[in-house]
Image: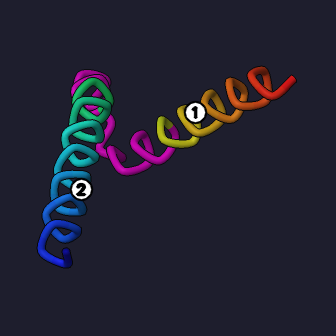
Amino acid sequence: MEAWHARLTDDLLVARAHQLLERLGPVVTGARAAGDRNIIGHVLQMEAQLSDASGDRSSAASA
């Protein structure tokens, strides 16, 4: 059972990593195009926006 759980956890981590890469691609490209070297700042800003948006959807769904 532990091996199955470890495999599932690994699969979930890989899926999450792919999601993050898909989200970060446009941010990094946009930051580079703007000549901005603060890519980490852009990533954090986008993550905050995504969190806010998912929170808004959760609030609306629970209302």
Residue 42's image quarter?
Answer: top left
Q: Is residue 42 magenta?
A: yes
What residue would you read off at disc 1?
49
Measured along the vertical axis of the image, is residue 26 above or below residue 49? above
Q: Residue shown at 61%/31% (left/top)?
A: 54
User: Residue 41's x, y, as percent?
Assistant: 44, 48
Q: Please identify the residue farthest to the front as the structure is shown.
A: 1
Quarter of the image where the C terminus is located: top right
- For residue 50, side relative to residue 17 (left or right): right
Give me the C-alpha separation between circle 1 and circle 2: 22 Å
The colour scheme is rainbow
Which disc number belongs to residue 13? 2
> Disc 1 or 2, which lies upstream in sequence?
2
Q: Residues within 10 Å of mark 2 (few under 14, many from 20)?
A: few
The stretch of residues the image draws in magenta is: 28-45
SS at circle 2: helix
Q: Residue shown at 23%/68% (left/top)?
A: 5
SS at circle 1: helix
> Is 19 in front, or is 33?
19
- For residue 57, side relative to residue 10 (left or right): right
